[in-house]
Amino acid sequence: MSNTNFTAVPSESLHSELSGRSPVLLLREKIIAIRNTLRPGQQQMADWQSGPLAISAVPGAGKSTAMAAAAAIAIARQYERSSFRSHLVVVTFTRSAAANIKAKIRKFLRDDLSLPQMGFFVYTLHGLALNIASRHSDLSGLQLENITLITPTQSHRFIRTAVEQWIANNPGVYLRLLEGHQFDGEETERLRRQSVLRTEVLPELANTVIHEAKSSGISQELLREWSKQTTDEYAILNVAAGLYEQYQNLMRSRDFIDYDDMILAALRVLENDSARRIEQNQVFAVFEDEAQDSSPLQTQLLEILASDGGDGGDDSSLLTPNSTFPTPHYPLSPEGAPPSPLPITPYPQRGPHLPHSPLNLVRVGDPNQAINSTFTPADPIYFRQFCEECDRIKRLATMDQAGRSTRIIIEAANFALKWINNQSLAAANNKQQTPVNRQVPFRLQTIRPVEVGDPQTNANPAPVGRGLELYTPRDIHQTVELLSQRVIELFGEDPTKNSAAILVRENRQGRWLAEALTLMCKEHNIILYDVGERDRRSHVPQEILALLQFCDRPHSPDYLKAALEALVQRQLIPTQDLNALASLPEEFLYPGPLAAPQSETVQKAARLCRSLLRARLELPLYQLISFLALTLNYDQAELATADKLAERVNQQIAGNSSMGGMLSALSEIVSSERFEPVETEDSEERYTRRGQLTIITMHKAKGLDWDYVFLPFLHENLIPGRFWVPPQSQFLGDFTLSEVARAQIRAALHGESTIPDVTQAWEQAKHLKISEEYRLLYVAMTRAKRLVWMSAAQKAPFTWSKPDNLQEQAPCPVFPALKRQFPECVMNLAAMTKQA
């Protein structure tokens, strides 16, 4: 974009000329005005003009607001310099976060700077990668009109097929796995072990390693090289490499890609000198939010874009001087399909050479809120390293002032962080070992309340009650009683004044709580919103599949009942005895003259079912999903998700357009993929409405806040939890192949001198899980503004799949420590019972 066709005149230009003040001077004054509304750590981000900068922010420090302000100021400085050739790229983790920060940047540009709302783009990491790959499809190998994007789970057909093909090609290695540690050759045991390996162990290993390897630019060949450095009897990394190879072949043969392929495709584009210069010259800087959640290749993609492309001189190396990661090479296959990456060799663990870096890269994150590393390749060590190197050259800012929470909550979170780190160091010392890669669970970073005169309204609000309340109920049923009583007190006469959430570790706890609290919430006019139930990833595909299966076989009692259940769930027909209706499908759908008269509710259900069957006969196949979505009375987001589903299915069955093909494709999506819904409204607003009690998992609560937060069921078996080897796979040993492989891959990526053996890798995997679970608790505690309510019942289920099976459960280790540190916050249940 040249200066001649990019003209922007601030609205105050005429006024400034008449008053004798230049537009540039006015703009600078406005920049200073925005800066003065920010806190010290936020101001350092706003002062950025070039080079690398790391911002380590505590929970509640206002990261997104500060990033939006800094982005608007950076764009304004481009106007100062009359530099209109390039734009700012802002990258964040989720689509909802991207929409949120985009709106904030536009508001700063429009309301505070009187500038056009342009000069920047906001992407998710995968959105940015797909944008680059699609602009250069000849280099990326992605022809968007031909490819299908999937998010496979370990039960996906490609994973299962890859396992079967690997077994056929490697009978000797498979036999070694079958023998395990001990095997007497008994035929029944052989068949049992075969089933476990084929349906559980190997699919889990494949799913884990494929994601870890592709997100880090690791090829099958390199996995095999690493395997030679290990001594484990199963050669786990070699097995994983074979599974990875089979999976890639299957994906390539069908023109399927996954999200990791998007990043790889963008990097293939950026290996081309000309394409790289084109992309770099369009970007004057990259701002990254939630940097602690980036994988190695995602970080490398941003580093390349943030590098100064120069004038097209000798730029033969993709490696920027500060790149922590090596550059893999991804040549195109003759067919133009995404190939497997070639071998790469990670650098030894060392810091990047930031002083000489041309990077214009601002990375904002909180390593203490890294809660995805046990199920994604993201690892907080990478952002920690970036912070350490920036600190060495005095380019590290710490946003440690937080106005979200009352002071007692801040004190409790700070105490928990230090106590957990001390316990981790003590455990390592007892074992005479140093925590791997300095990975104590937390970066030593204390949350501080804001200073007097802070611009945030109601910063560090007054506590409600004691601000921190610690309960030890006798069991989970008393937990519900105490929680209900406190909710009623807090919401008071006008529930619309407050927001509250119950944060659970897993969805099964949420479902149990939702059932237990429904009557109380109805009685007191409190909206109960169960996020786990409402936001099930697959509810649209499941419901569409249920109706299509009924349309295909209307006389099947099972399919008729499933369709009726979907219609009842959507409140399209009244609740009734569905078993009675489904037991005689023909009599229900087309009652004869001698049949007993149907009630009005039954007639309504029958009419709706017959309309579905008529649509099956009259509509073309490709319109059926859209029709069913309208019939189910979907809202805007669900209709968009149904359209996405229809496009995916129709593309997949293009060569075999039949009801059978459609049902097969839909069944696979429902059973073996994480189908991403389309979000058309702000999820933050949906989860944090006033007058609403939200039940949500701790993971999903990240980035949100409420006046009151309830944390029930804080037990050791869930936080930090224990690594559990399923009994059916214990014939392989006291470890799981997938977690050992993950730990070995990360050790190699982190530059350790040797790849750990099975025992060491299993211990490292345990450490990773424990650290992440404690960070998850820290995130949960810091969601609260005025009160955090915590409880650990003496009796709780061993597993929440059987919530009635109560037994003695130890509390999460940090819970007794909090009770000792804050005795004034320990609630006297005996006194409360007497008062009640």
Image (tube, rainbow, N blue to C red):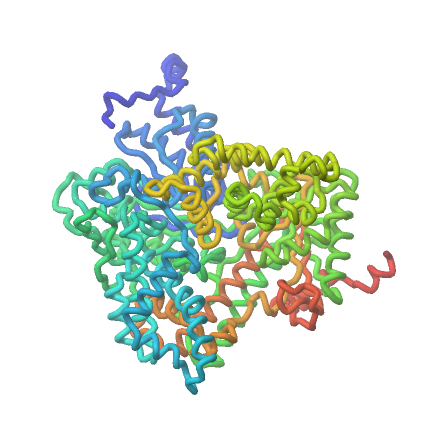
For residue 516, which quarter of the picture? Answer: bottom right
Q: Say if residue 45 shows up in the picture.
A: yes
Asked if 477 appears above or below 278 in the picture, the reply is below
The answer to whether 120 is drawn above or below residue 546 in the figure is above
Q: Residue at x 30, y 44 (%)?
A: 360
Q: In which quarter of the image is the N terminus?
A: top left
Question: Residue 43: where, in percent of width, then height?
Answer: 44, 42
Q: Which residue is drawn at 51% across and 71% down?
A: 723
Q: Is residue 377 left or right of residue 403?
A: left
x and y, in percent, of residue 625 in the image = 48, 37
Q: Residue at x 43, y 44 (%)?
A: 662
The quarter of the picture where residue 123 lies is top left
Quarter occupied by the C terminus: bottom right
Looking at the image, can residue 182 be seen?
no
**How far across and down, in percent of the image, does residue 546 sit?**
54, 45
Q: Which of 143 and 102 is in front in this view?
A: 143
Q: From the viewer's perspective, tell me whether residue 260 is left or right of residue 663.
A: left
Q: Is residue 376 left or right of residue 405?
A: left
Compared to residue 173, the image places residue 343 above or below, namely above
The residue drawn where x is 63% and y is 58% is 509
Residue nearer the viewer, 692 or 15? 692
Most distant residue in the front direction: 594
| Residue farthest left in this picture | 314
Indicate the position of residue 555 as horizontal and vertical percent values. 57, 45
Which residue is most to the top? 18
The number of discs equals: 0
In front of the other: 235 or 127? 235
Question: Image check: 383 left or right of 85?
Answer: right
